[in-house]
Image (spheres, grey):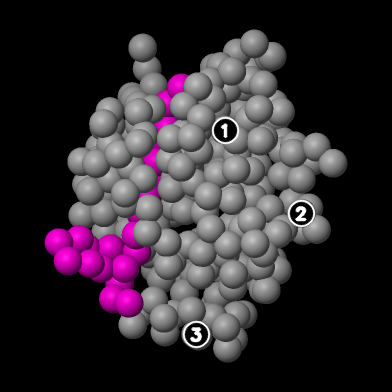
């Protein structure tokens, strides 16, 4: 089976030969999370949407508990997919954990990437000495234990918190439904892979120009985390958008599109 089939790749926009823009989703989501952002770039880019293995319309049989026990395994998936698609160096847009996956892949195979757009990135979610990740180790462990005990109940509780748009409850409901469409066993393992990872030391190896997009209020990745990623990357720009929550691709798509356009403009 091809990598494109495994990842349920969908391609739209500019014809073959145009620069490519690849969108990758965060934990518990799928490519539909980009529906308000990706079309804005179809006039100028060949737009590629994917589902990580275990999410959305991907091939669940391709999920490997050993390979996907670390974010490096997901980065391997991205490298294999970009090699197969052979679109030239791409603009890779990664939301949340996919931002870290993109950084790992770009450090390994920089020739595959033109620029990175990192939306709400976090190389480590757990607080450390001199570093604010947003959660204590105990909070992360409690979050994972709650998920293990009642995944659907956890999804219904946490999704509106992540979205942060209490004035638009339909967005929280959409994220809840996305979580609930994900295979619970895979989701629980991916959560541990995501929330227990520490990829801070990997940032120094990235030389790909990057845009770090941070929301002014985000319970998952505080502003300090975005600033840390920006400070650690050799060639990056930091943009703070006037948005609340961890999913500006749904809650503030126009602000995100504007930030991306300004960064990508010649």
11 magenta-colored? no
* Nearer-N-terminus badge (1/2): 1
Query: What is the magenta range?
Result: 114-137
Quadrant (top left/top right/bottom left/bottom right) for the C terminus = top left
Residue 30: image location, x then y, percent: 62, 52
Q: Which residue corresponds to mark 2?
A: 62
Residue that appears at 37% across and 53% down: 199
C-alpha distance separating marks 3 and 2:
26 Å
C-alpha distance separating marks 1 and 3:
33 Å
Q: Which residue corresponds to mark 3?
A: 145
Extreme residue toward the bottom, this view = 149
* Nearer-N-terminus badge (3/2): 2
What secondary structure is the stretch in magenta mostly built from?
Answer: loop
Q: Which mark is residue 22?
A: 1
Residue 243: image location, x then y, percent: 32, 51
Determine the image quadrant of residue 103. Answer: top left
116 magenta-colored? yes
Residue 132 can be seen in this image: yes
Q: Which mark is residue 212?
A: none
Determine the image quadrant of residue 133. Answer: bottom left
């Amino acid at each position: 089976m091809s990598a494109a089939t495994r990842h349920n790749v969908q391609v739209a926009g500019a014809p073959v030969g145009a620069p490519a823009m690849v969108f990758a989703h965060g934990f518990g989501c799928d490519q539909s999370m980009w529906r308000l952002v990706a079309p804005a770039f179809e006039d100028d880019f060949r737009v590629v949407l994917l589902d990580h293995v275990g999410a959305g319309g991907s091939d669940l049989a391709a999920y490997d508990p050993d390979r996907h026990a670390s974010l490096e395994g997901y980065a391997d998936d991205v490298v294999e997919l970009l090699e197969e698609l052979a679109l030239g160096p791409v603009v890779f847009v990664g939301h949340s954990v996919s931002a870290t996956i993109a950084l790992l892949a770009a450090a390994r195979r920089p020739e595959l990437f033109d620029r990175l757009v990192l939306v709400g990135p976090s190389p480590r979610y757990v607080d450390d000495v001199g570093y604010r990740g947003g959660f204590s180790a105990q909070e992360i462990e409690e979050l994972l234990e709650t998920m293990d005990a009642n995944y659907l109940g956890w999804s219904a509780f946490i999704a509106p918190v992540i979205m942060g748009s209490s004035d638009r409850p339909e967005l929280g409901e959409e994220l809840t439904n996305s979580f609930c469409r994900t295979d619970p066993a895979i989701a629980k393992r991916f959560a541990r892979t995501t929330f227990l990872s520490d990829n801070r030391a990997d940032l120094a190896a990235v030389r790909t120009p990057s845009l770090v997009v941070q929301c002014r209020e985000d319970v998952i990745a505080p502003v300090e985390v975005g600033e840390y990623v920006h400070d650690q990357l050799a060639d990056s720009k930091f943009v703070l958008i006037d948005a609340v929550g961890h999913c500006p691709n749904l809650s503030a798509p126009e602000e995100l599109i504007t930030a991306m356009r300004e960064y990508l403009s010649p």
